[in-house]
Image (cartoon, rainbow, N blue to C red):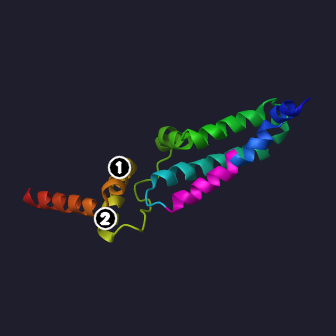
């Protein structure tokens, strides 16, 4: 078995830690520093799913030892979670449908109090859209939208 054979045989051991731990750790630290919660959602969901995988492995290791390609299945699944926003997909299409957590989630404390109150009243989808709007046009633009909505509400 040459060098390529050894690499192929131990591919999951070579690439796994970087794919499943190092890059997600780096991306999570970067996400903490951004004002948007969209990347936070991706990486928090990734770590929750990765924790479930680790618990599953610890609980079922005797059975998994007999699954011939388990390490590669796990590696491919984690690569999908990391590089193809699979974690955000699972959160948006599975977790949010079955786990209701309400709208009273914490809003980033970087926003002024008036904006934070408005964001707390919104659904998660609306909040994500507003955070994208703030990221693109700045917090002053959002403040003008709030004032225009208040002015319009007073008319009616």
Quadrant of the image containing the N terminus: top right
| Up-down relation of residue 63 to residue 36 (above or below) | above
Q: Which residue is mark 1?
A: 129
Q: Is any part of residue 116 visible from this angle?
A: yes
Q: Residue furthest right?
A: 1
Within 10 Å of disc 2 (Cα), the crowding (few <14, some 14-19, many 20+) is some
Label pair 1/2, CB-CB below 8 angstroms = no
Q: Secondary structure at mark 2?
A: helix
Q: Which residue is mark 2?
A: 115
Q: Is residue 105 left or right of residue 121?
A: right
Q: Is residue 39 left or right of residue 107?
A: right
Q: Between residues 22 and 131, which one lies in front from this camera angle?
A: 22
Residue at image point 61% right, 50% down: 48
Region in magenta: 19-33
Residue 154: within the magenta? Answer: no
Residue at image point 58% right, 56% down: 28
């Amino acid at each position: 078995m040459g060098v390529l054979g050894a690499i192929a045989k131990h591919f999951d051991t070579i690439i796994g830690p970087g794919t499943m731990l190092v890059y997600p750790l780096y991306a999570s630290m970067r996400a903490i520093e951004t004002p948007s919660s969209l990347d936070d959602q991706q990486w928090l969901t990734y770590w929750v799913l990765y924790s479930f995988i680790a618990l599953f492995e610890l609980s079922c290791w005797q059975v998994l030892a007999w699954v011939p390609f388990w390490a590669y299945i796990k590696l491919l699944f984690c690569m999908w979670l990391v590089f193809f926003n699979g974690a955000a997909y699972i959160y948006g299409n599975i977790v949010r449908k079955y786990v209701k957590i309400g709208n009273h989630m914490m809003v980033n404390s970087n926003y002024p109090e008036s904006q934070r109150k408005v964001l707390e009243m919104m659904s998660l989808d609306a909040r994500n859209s507003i955070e994208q709007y703030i990221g693109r046009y700045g917090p002053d633009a959002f403040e003008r939208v709030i004032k225009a909505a208040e002015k319009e509400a007073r008319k009616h």
